[in-house]
Amino acid sequence: MQVLDTAGLDGGRGARAGGRVLVPVDGSPAASRALPVAAALAGRADTLVDVVSVIAPGDDGASRRSDVEQALRRLGTAAGHGHLSRAADPAAAIATLAASPGGGCPAPLVCLTSHGHSRLSTVPIGAVAAGVIARTTRPVLVVGPLAAPGYPDAPVVALLGGRPGAAAEDRATARHAIRLARTLDVPLQLVVALGDADAGAPARRAAEERLDDLVASARAKGGDVSGRLVEDPSSPVAGLCHLLRSRPAQLVVASQQRPGSLPCCADPVLHLLHQCPVPVAVCPS
């Protein structure tokens, strides 16, 4: 078991050529819920799970080191390295560690829960999770309050807008989803979810045509790819979550509406994180 003190991410110790799954912990039961999810994904991807905890200024770091060591023990054979980062901003430190080979952990995927110590029942995502999403160009896998580890061999599901105005965002989401499905060696299902605002035959036909184009493009890149149109009068997110309760998935891939910014309450991805029965990989579009 190795715990590396990154001391602001300028040490460069423990650098590796390959990427791993990175899980931030803060000693809370909520944060530790990401560990079994990360371990399951790492097993499928034939990699390991690194753990990081951020030490606040003035803290001697003893409790954070204990948190990291306990998390590594829980991971068992999936455990990689532990990292202690001394920083005032946990989200910035986590995002930098994930992106920096010099920090010793070039991680293609960050996996965290939607809330840790700072949980507020009135908001769908915690400040650290929102901050990491806003600061990274990599997928961030968020384990929401209702999410459980994905089912073995179940597909990766990509949530697409299916409208002409969302074409660029849909292509970006599909690219991230294809990469994750290949890494996990599972099928990919592209889903266009329609709500009451999309009601009517013309809107449905347009969505079906767009979905067919996206499926054809994804199949051309190789792999097992299917498409599905979901309709729910209450909201697209409700329709997708209803589908996932009856048809298991490994995880859902979705793109935030305003990449590079903190997610806002109007962003459907936030509602998806709060309701989804499986983890959600939030990607920049």
Image (tube, rainbow, N blue to C red):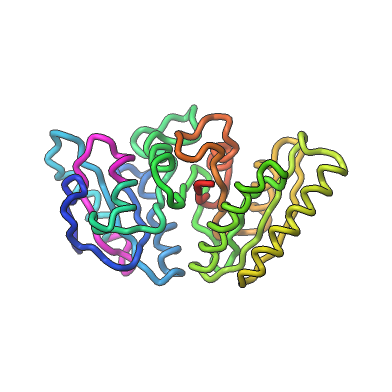
Q: Which of 107 and 258 is in front in this view?
A: 258
Measured from the top left, where is residue 115 in percent x and y?
41, 39
Is residue 82 visible from the viewing direction of this image?
A: no
Write the residue at 81% across / 42% down: 203
Residue 217 sits inside the magenta stretch: no
Number of callouts? 0
Measured from the top left, where is residue 85 in percent x and y?
21, 46
Query: Residue extending furthest right?
Result: 201
Measured from the top left, where is residue 226 in percent x and y?
70, 64
The quarter of the picture where the N terminus appears is: bottom left
Q: In this view, does 201 lie to the left or right of 19?
A: right
Is residue 13 visible from the viewing direction of this image?
A: yes
Write the residue at 87% across / 43% down: 201
- The image quadrant that residue 47 belongs to is bottom left
Q: In this view, does 62 lie to the left or right of 232?
A: left
Q: Which of 116 and 164 is in front in this view?
A: 164
Write the residue at 70% across / 50% down: 192
Magenta part of the chain: 73-94
Q: Nearer the viewer, residue 159 or 248?
A: 159
Q: Is residue 219 left or right of residue 180?
A: right
Measured from the top left, where is residue 121 in percent x and y?
47, 30
